[in-house]
Image (tube, rainbow, N blue to C red):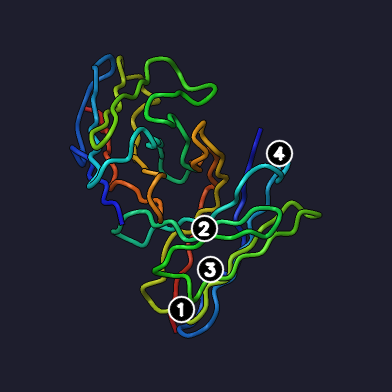
């Protein structure tokens, strides 16, 4: 069974970098994209970025300048760094797996449980 | 960005009820729509992709339909484990975007 588990610091100071890692078990990382999605308190889910094992990435234009993703296939993990954070980045962060439908578009088929990150001094 | 509007935002229902949730896209998305279920403190669970294709293991009392801009998720007979919040997601636009959720509560 595919399982994803987020880990990382739950409290980050303003202007610093948020760093999260997602550990994948029960599946190979090949043939999928691996993504981060967040939900700020009281707001809708927001897709952040994705990466595949070849290091190909896409990110939300609204966050692109601050997002860095990486993948470590030897440890079945992928990571997110979000720079220059503010209180607006306080959210539950989810990692997820994306797979192609028959037309080649990527949809989320597995999610992690989510981890709360608070940006505060 | 493509805006996804779900309705209702919440509803009360009883076990055995037929429940329908609507998701509308601000522009046509063909059938590139997914539905998720989330319970408090749990990982969201994928139910449906391509508007109507059930994920493996999803009970057959769930069904999805629609194309273009209007989509529905139907639970034909609500079970106790179905009380949760449901979200739609369009995945043809860039970036992908989500609906605001529909919470199903016990009447």
- Residue placed under numbered mark 1 in the picture: A85
Horizontal and vertical percent position of residue B14? 23, 21
Q: Earlier in the sequence, mark 2 or mark 3?
A: 3
Residue at 47% x, 36% y: name it.
Answer: B45
Q: CA distance from mark 4 to mark 2?
A: 21 Å
* Secondary structure category for the residue under label 2: strand
Q: Which label is found at residue A27?
A: 4
Q: Nearer the viewer, residue A100 or B74?
A: A100
Q: Quadrant of residue A68?
A: bottom right
Parent chain of label 1: A
* N-term mark: 4 or 1: 4
In the displayed structure image, the side of residue B6 where residue A69 appears, left or right: right
Quarter of the image with the N terminus of chain B is bottom left
Q: Residues within 10 Å of mark 2 (few under 14, many from 20)?
A: many
Residue matched to label 2: A115
Label 3 to label 1, Cα distance in Å? 13 Å
The residue wearing badge 3 is A10
């Amino acid at each position: 069974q595919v399982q994803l588990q987020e880990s990382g610091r739950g409290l980050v100071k303003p202007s610093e970098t948020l760093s999260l890692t997602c550990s994948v078990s029960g599946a190979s990382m090949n043939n999928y994209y691996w993504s981060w999605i967040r939900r700020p308190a009281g707001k809708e889910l927001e897709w952040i970025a994705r990466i595949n094992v070849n290091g190909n990435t896409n990110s939300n234009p609204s966050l692109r300048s601050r997002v860095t993703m990486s993948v470590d296939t030897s440890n079945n993990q992928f990571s997110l760094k979000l720079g220059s954070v503010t209180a607006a980045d306080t959210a539950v962060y989810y990692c997820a797996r994306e797979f192609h439908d028959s037309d080649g578009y990527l949809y989320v088929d597995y999610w992690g449980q989510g981890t709360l990150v608070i940006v505060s001094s | 960005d493509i805006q996804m509007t779900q309705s209702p935002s919440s509803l009360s229902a009883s076990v055995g009820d037929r429940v329908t949730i609507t998701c509308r896209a601000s522009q046509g998305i063909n059938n590139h729509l997914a539905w998720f279920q989330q319970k408090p403190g749990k990982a969201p669970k994928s139910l449906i992709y391509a508007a109507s294709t059930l994920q493996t293991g999803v009970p057959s009392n769930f069904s999805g339909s629609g194309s273009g801009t209007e989509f529905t998720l139907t639970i034909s007979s609500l079970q106790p484990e179905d009380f949760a919040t449901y979200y739609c997601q369009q995945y043809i636009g860039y970036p992908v975007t989500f609906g605001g959720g529909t919470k199903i509560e016990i009447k």
